[in-house]
Protein backbone atom coordinates (compact mmCIF):
# COMPACT_ATOMS: atom_id res chain seq x y z
CA UNK A 1 0.00 0.00 0.00
CA UNK A 2 1.22 3.50 -0.81
CA UNK A 3 1.80 5.80 2.16
CA UNK A 4 0.53 9.35 1.61
CA UNK A 5 2.49 11.93 3.62
CA UNK A 6 0.06 14.53 5.05
CA UNK A 7 2.41 17.39 4.15
CA UNK A 8 2.34 16.38 0.45
CA UNK A 9 -1.33 15.44 -0.06
CA UNK A 10 -4.36 16.49 1.95
CA UNK A 11 -7.86 15.18 1.32
CA UNK A 12 -11.01 17.29 1.56
CA UNK A 13 -12.57 14.75 3.95
CA UNK A 14 -12.05 11.34 5.52
CA UNK A 15 -14.14 9.60 2.84
CA UNK A 16 -11.88 10.91 0.06
CA UNK A 17 -8.85 9.84 2.07
CA UNK A 18 -10.21 6.27 2.31
CA UNK A 19 -11.07 6.27 -1.42
CA UNK A 20 -7.37 6.78 -2.23
CA UNK A 21 -6.77 3.10 -1.38
CA UNK A 22 -9.45 2.04 -3.90
CA UNK A 23 -8.31 3.94 -7.00
CA UNK A 24 -5.96 2.56 -9.65
CA UNK A 25 -2.28 2.31 -8.60
CA UNK A 26 -1.25 4.49 -11.57
CA UNK A 27 -3.67 7.18 -10.35
CA UNK A 28 -2.16 6.94 -6.86
CA UNK A 29 1.30 7.53 -8.38
CA UNK A 30 -0.07 10.44 -10.44
CA UNK A 31 -1.51 12.05 -7.29
CA UNK A 32 1.73 11.62 -5.35
CA UNK A 33 3.78 13.06 -8.24
CA UNK A 34 1.51 16.12 -8.36
CA UNK A 35 1.63 16.57 -4.59
CA UNK A 36 5.39 16.13 -4.42
CA UNK A 37 5.90 18.70 -7.16
CA UNK A 38 3.73 21.29 -5.40
CA UNK A 39 5.27 20.66 -1.99
CA UNK A 40 8.92 20.67 -3.07
CA UNK A 41 8.49 23.56 -5.54
CA UNK A 42 6.13 25.89 -3.68
CA UNK A 43 5.84 24.47 -0.14
CA UNK A 44 2.12 23.88 -0.75
CA UNK A 45 0.13 20.82 0.30
CA UNK A 46 -2.04 19.76 -2.64
CA UNK A 47 -5.68 19.02 -1.76
CA UNK A 48 -7.55 16.14 -3.41
CA UNK A 49 -11.24 17.00 -3.55
CA UNK A 50 -12.72 14.16 -5.58
CA UNK A 51 -11.81 10.55 -6.31
CA UNK A 52 -14.70 8.09 -6.54
CA UNK A 53 -18.19 9.09 -7.71
CA UNK A 54 -21.35 7.13 -8.33
CA UNK A 55 -21.98 8.76 -11.74
CA UNK A 56 -21.42 5.96 -14.28
CA UNK A 57 -20.58 8.51 -16.99
CA UNK A 58 -17.57 9.74 -15.00
CA UNK A 59 -14.07 8.26 -15.02
CA UNK A 60 -14.15 8.90 -11.26
CA UNK A 61 -16.70 6.09 -10.92
CA UNK A 62 -14.06 3.55 -11.98
CA UNK A 63 -11.16 4.84 -9.89
CA UNK A 64 -9.46 6.53 -12.83
CA UNK A 65 -10.00 10.24 -12.05
CA UNK A 66 -8.86 12.84 -9.52
CA UNK A 67 -9.66 16.50 -8.92
CA UNK A 68 -7.21 18.88 -7.23
CA UNK A 69 -8.41 22.03 -5.44
CA UNK A 70 -7.07 25.22 -6.98
CA UNK A 71 -8.75 27.93 -4.92
CA UNK A 72 -5.68 27.94 -2.66
CA UNK A 73 -3.25 28.25 -5.62
CA UNK A 74 -2.19 31.30 -7.59
CA UNK A 75 -2.70 31.18 -11.35
CA UNK A 76 1.05 30.72 -11.77
CA UNK A 77 1.15 27.79 -9.34
CA UNK A 78 -1.79 26.09 -11.10
CA UNK A 79 -0.15 26.68 -14.47
CA UNK A 80 3.12 25.21 -13.16
CA UNK A 81 1.33 22.09 -11.90
CA UNK A 82 -0.34 21.52 -15.27
CA UNK A 83 2.94 22.10 -17.11
CA UNK A 84 4.76 19.68 -14.80
CA UNK A 85 2.14 16.93 -15.18
CA UNK A 86 2.04 17.26 -18.97
CA UNK A 87 5.84 17.17 -19.13
CA UNK A 88 6.40 14.42 -16.56
CA UNK A 89 3.52 12.12 -17.51
CA UNK A 90 2.66 11.21 -21.12
CA UNK A 91 -0.14 13.42 -22.44
CA UNK A 92 -1.09 12.68 -26.03
CA UNK A 93 -4.72 13.04 -27.02
CA UNK A 94 -4.75 12.49 -30.78
CA UNK A 95 -2.51 9.50 -31.34
CA UNK A 96 -3.95 6.41 -33.06
CA UNK A 97 -4.38 3.17 -31.16
CA UNK A 98 -2.56 1.45 -29.55
CA UNK A 99 -0.74 4.55 -28.24
CA UNK A 100 -3.70 6.17 -26.55
CA UNK A 101 -2.90 8.47 -23.61
CA UNK A 102 -1.70 7.02 -20.37
CA UNK A 103 -2.69 10.20 -18.54
CA UNK A 104 -4.88 13.19 -19.24
CA UNK A 105 -4.85 16.56 -17.52
CA UNK A 106 -7.65 19.11 -17.87
CA UNK A 107 -7.56 22.67 -16.61
CA UNK A 108 -11.02 23.28 -15.19
CA UNK A 109 -10.24 26.47 -13.28
CA UNK A 110 -12.29 28.79 -15.46
CA UNK A 111 -16.10 29.13 -15.23
CA UNK A 112 -17.94 26.82 -17.61
CA UNK A 113 -15.12 24.28 -17.95
CA UNK A 114 -16.87 21.66 -15.82
CA UNK A 115 -20.42 22.47 -16.78
CA UNK A 116 -20.84 24.46 -13.55
CA UNK A 117 -21.12 21.24 -11.52
CA UNK A 118 -18.00 21.76 -9.46
CA UNK A 119 -15.76 24.58 -8.39
CA UNK A 120 -12.47 25.45 -10.07
CA UNK A 121 -10.05 22.54 -10.12
CA UNK A 122 -7.46 20.62 -12.11
CA UNK A 123 -8.67 17.21 -13.27
CA UNK A 124 -6.37 14.28 -13.95
CA UNK A 125 -7.09 10.75 -15.09
CA UNK A 126 -5.44 7.55 -16.15
CA UNK A 127 -6.51 5.84 -19.34
CA UNK A 128 -8.77 2.97 -18.38
CA UNK A 129 -8.01 1.15 -21.67
CA UNK A 130 -4.48 0.44 -20.43
CA UNK A 131 -5.45 -1.20 -17.15
Image: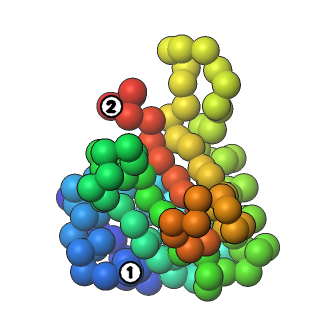
Q: Position of residue 13 (x, y in %)?
A: 31, 82
Q: Position of residue 47 (x, y in %)?
A: 47, 77
The residue that appears at 69% across and 68% down in the rendered structure is: 111
Identify residue for label 2. 131
Say which quarter of the image contains residue 74. bottom right
Q: In the visual, does 104 lie left or right of 48?
A: right
Identify residue for label 1. 12
Front one among 54 and 131: 54
- The reply to whether residue 32 is in sight is yes
The residue that appears at 44% across and 83% down in the rendered structure is: 7
Which element is circle 2 on? Answer: loop
Front one among 59 and 4: 59
Q: In the visual, does 77 lie left or right of 48?
A: right
The residue that appears at 24% across and 75% down in the rendered structure is: 15
Front one among 113 and 27: 113
Say which quarter of the image contains residue 108. bottom right
Sequence order check, earlier mark of 2 and 1: 1
Q: Quadrant of the N terminus?
A: bottom left
Q: Position of residue 100 (x, y in %)?
A: 54, 24
The dot on residue 106 is none
Q: In the visual, does 70 lie left or right of 76?
A: left
Q: CA distance from mark 2 to mark 1?
A: 27 Å
Q: Quadrant of the C terminus?
A: top left
The residue that appears at 67% across and 25% down in the rendered structure is: 94
Which element is circle 1 on? Answer: loop
- The reply to whether residue 8 is in sight is no
Q: Is residue 106 above or below residue 131?
A: below
Amino acid sequence: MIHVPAHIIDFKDIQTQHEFRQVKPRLQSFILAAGSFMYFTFGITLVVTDLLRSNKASVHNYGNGVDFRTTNLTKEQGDALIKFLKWQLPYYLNLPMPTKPKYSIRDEREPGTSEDRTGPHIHGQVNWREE
